[in-house]
Amino acid sequence: MKIAIPNKGRLQQPVLQFLNSVGIKPLASDERALIVPTNWEGVQLVMVRTEDIPNIVEAGAAELGITGFDYVLESGVDVEELVHLDFGKAKIVLAVPVSWGINSPEEIKGEIRIATKYFNIARNYLAQKGIKAKLVKISGAAEVMPSLGAADAIIDVMSTGTTLKLHGLKAIDTVMESRAVVIGNKDWIKSDEAERINLLLTLMKGALFARNKKMVFMNVPDEKLDKVLSVLPAMLSPTLSKLAKSDAWEVITVIDEDTLPEIIGKVVANGARDIVIVDIEKVIK
């Protein structure tokens, strides 16, 4: 089984870290390697350009791929979106020179030239907005194109906006929002690898669900149990075990990290003690 992943760029390290959390680790670190074996027998990583991954998966050269949703949409491929991930978030924006003094695409007058590597996304956006523009297709940095005189404006990825500002540009509209996504060939369910792919997708979802969650163990006196349970969240219900040598209970539950301080304060106030908090690697639902 082959999984196509970025060979460089902003998504490469987050993708490798995510696969590591799932349990898939590359067994080679040569940056020149195109196909890398992993600790999963028969599972290989195909290291390719981020924008090429949708086409590679559609062609069946890799059963799965992890890339940006913007590249999936731009390529127009017929693949299955299997898991939307929680990293690689980005905005594709329409940016114009600050000197134009406008704040929305509706203020654009006449026909302009727009530099972009998102030709299809840009074309659809411009049609929806009714903007007259000639698209200048590029493969490198878009921000420099207006200052070079190669274009009047750009449609490109924006993270903080600092790079746009350095080049005298500002975003006046969001074309789309993107994030990393796991895609699969349309026929993956019929392949010999379907069972292993299903397992991998289950582990991926489990790793995602476990993000920012903690498992909490606590001891609660019998007379305090109802009060503690009344303020204690759980995925389904807390697990209770009667302690062998005490008139108390061990209570186990899973809590979102963001709410942990508030919940711990409440259970302590209601009589819980001996609280232990541990990380969770995966939650299989």
Image (cartoon, grey):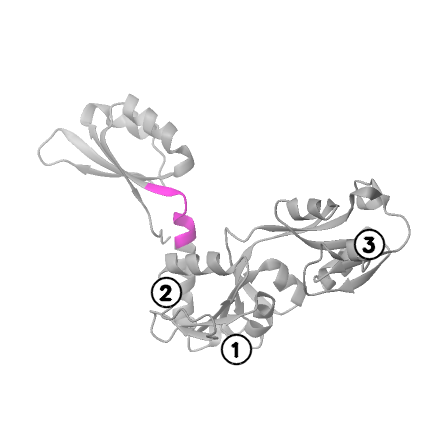
Q: Residue at x 38, y 56 (%)?
A: 21
Q: CA distance from mark 1 to mark 2?
A: 21 Å
Q: Quadrant of the N terminus?
A: bottom left
What residue range appears in magenta? 207-214
Task: Using the rendered view, name the quadrant where residue 125 is placed.
Answer: bottom right
Residue 235 placed where, x, y %? 37, 42
Kindly state the secondary structure of the residue where label 2 is placed: loop
Which residue carries the number 3 mark?
152
Q: CA distance from mark 3 to mark 2?
A: 45 Å
Amino acid type, callout 2: Lys
Q: Nearer the viewer, residue 93 or 34?
A: 34
Amino acid type, callout 1: Ala
Q: Is residue 110 above or below residue 119?
A: above
Which residue carries the number 2 mark?
25
Residue 1 can be seen, yes or no: no
Q: Nearer the viewer, residue 142 or 187?
A: 142
Residue lying at the far right in this picture: please name it.
110
Q: Which mark is residue 61?
A: 1
